Image (spheres, helix red, strand yellow):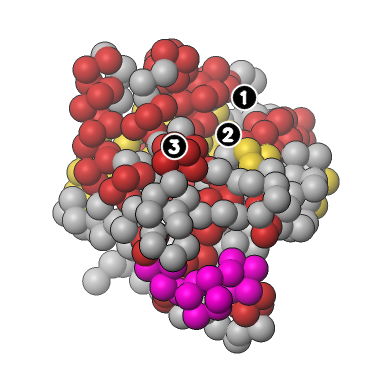
Amino acid sequence: MPRHNFRPLQGRIEYLEIESTALQDNLLDDPHRRQTAIYLPAGYDATSDDYPLFLDLAGFTGSGLKHLAWQAFGESLPQRVDRLTSHDDMGPVILVLPDCFTSLGGNQYVNSIAMGRWEDYLLQEVVPLVEQRYRVRSGPGHRAVFGRSSGGYGALIQGMRHGEHWGAVACHSGDMNFDILYRSDLPRTLDVLARHERSVERFLTHLESEPKLTGNDTHALMILAMAASYAPEADAPRGVRLPVDLWTCALDDRRWRRWLEHDPLTLIEQPSVQDSLRRLSGLFIDCGSYDQYAIHYGTRALARRLDALGIKHTHEEFADNHSGVEYRLDRSLPFLYRAVG
């Protein structure tokens, strides 16, 4: 049984309200005024020290705000950072926990006319405002971004596309190898839509009147969110159109190619992405060896390709699945600190 962390927070939490330009006019009609939590380390007010910036990206159905919460037989993310700091596994940091939840259940942290320009929001609005308000060490070499699942994917995308803005990246069980990860969910999503006249709009309207989501509903919603993230279409309901025929599930090659353009296994073949990753001082990638979404196969393939390209990284595989693996942050957070501290 994991040990419960009874220790109270040693630092303090503040909140920023961000009136975002990047998130305006999204097709989901989600709010563009967003809250970001900031965890300031113990001693922040008593010293004039500067600190590295650590940006936390939550997984699907999550939020940075959720990572502040009490955990049974566990700890909140700030408690974890406190513990690792007190044990000298890492030094103090300014921890940034943005709320990036959407009405489709989560976020892949890429720019989308449907979901909003989340990639720009993080880089052009969240990070600059935190650096303006708080004593963050200057320069991208003192910034780290990390996350798990969809958050791990978002962190990896930051490194692949914007390595000049970051010192280090940690991707835990991040989405990759879309042919394995998403293809099998497409027919199951159609089965759910079939109960709503195969209409995305009718399905989403139905969910808004329900007191809770079933497991099948949640998985279907997740696939719709992927369509809205990777291949949004302005004339589709809320920007969502699936890359398959809704009756036969035959793949629409053109639309599926738009999804694959966001797959890390596709992106890694771009010279600009390789150059971006080479800018990093640290790249950490891991996944459980029996991840129920089969992400470990994509992670292995990416690590093999990084090896072949001579891109320095740390790849670890551990005996667990996709769920409840926040304990892996005990590996990545000290790694990130060594890279950017």
Q: Quadrant of residue 165?
A: top right
As for residue 242 lying within the magenta part, the answer is no
Task: Return the mark for residue 137.
Answer: 1
Amino acid, disc 2: Leu
Q: Secondary structure at mark 1?
A: loop
Q: Which residue is mark 3?
A: 257
Left or right for 269, reference 97: left
Task: Return the mark for residue 53.
Answer: 2
Residue 133 visible:
yes
Q: Quadrant of residue 185?
A: bottom left
Amino acid, disc 1: Arg
Q: Is residue 273 above or below residue 184?
A: above
Work out which quarter of the rendered image holds the N terminus and state it.
bottom left
Q: Secondary structure at mark 2?
A: strand
Bin the neighbour count of mark 3 within 10 Å (Cα to Cα): few under 14, some 14-19, many 20 and up. Answer: some
Q: Residue at x 41, y 18 (%)?
A: 270
User: Residue 162 location in percent, x, y?
Assistant: 54, 24
Bin the neighbour count of mark 2 within 10 Å (Cα to Cα): few under 14, some 14-19, many 20 and up. Answer: many
